[in-house]
Image (spheres, rainbow, N blue to C red):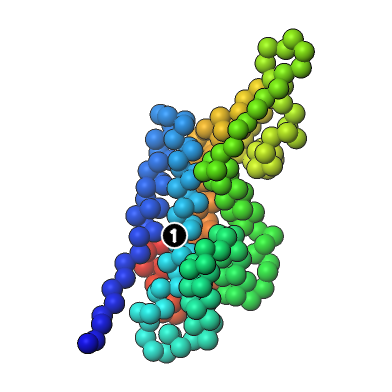
Amino acid sequence: MIKTYHFSPNTPVLRDIAINTQRVVALDSAQSLPCIVFCASVLESFINESFEYRRYLGSGARSCYTVREYAFEMHRMVAERERLQDKYFYALKLFFDNEDFKSQSVFESFKILVEVRNAIVHNKPEVMVTDGAASKPNIDLKSYPKFIRQLKSKRIISEVDGTTSWIDLLQSEEVAAWSVKTMNDMIQLFMSALDDGEYKECFTRYY
């Protein structure tokens, strides 16, 4: 029996949800938290679906050594649930044929976004300690998670007053906008690494 395969990526739908979540942050700042989580999830969905396009290419494009190697290896990485950062590092290194992308601000923001997503999803107890008779905690900037310091250095977070939880500091329009920009920029970075041709056209059709 001849089997016919059909594939339509789910990532564009998830991306629209992430963008719509950003739009409501102006009315409810707490929505920046699901926006962060969704943006990182979109990037995971994007890279996880990326190898499947090869199946639907013409015979010439499908036999391209780089695309074939990528499809087999990414299929393995997805099946074995390797880290999101490792999947993108492999993909970008293969298609760019160098590691220059590591110094680009978008790749740095991507790594921060994943760390923030992980901190939210795998939240651990946050204990604030006061000295003596102080009624409010006074947390040194160095005591906050590294990603808070990184976001402050990028001016995504403006003020860290030492009395606010890191999860509250993430609840802003600026953080939500940064998350969506990082999501879109990473998708474009991946696509910019691809040679013109059938495989790249699979992505430009949706992104």
From this viewpoint, which residue is outermost toward the left? 1
Residue 91 in the image: state x and y as whole percent.
56, 70
Q: Image quadrant for the N terminus?
A: bottom left
Q: Quadrant of the C terminus?
A: bottom left
In percent of width and height, residue 139 lies at 72, 26
- Local crowd size for mark 1, using a 10 Å CA cut-off: few (<14), some (14–19), many (≥20): some
- Say left or right for 113 vs 57: right
Residue found 68% across the figure and 67% down from its top: 100
Q: Position of residue 71 (x, y in %)?
A: 48, 77
Question: Where residue 66 sits in the image (x, y, percent)?
Answer: 54, 82
Q: Is residue 12 above or below residue 199?
A: above
Q: Is residue 156 above or below residue 78?
A: above
Q: Quadrant of residue 13?
A: bottom left
Which residue lies at the image location 64% right of the left edge and 54% below the top edge? Answer: 108
Q: What amino acid type is highlighted by mark number 1? A: Ser
Using the rendered view, name the quadrant where residue 164 is placed. top right
Above or below, comparing residue 70 to residue 149 in the picture: below
Query: Which residue is disc 1 drawn over?
Result: 45
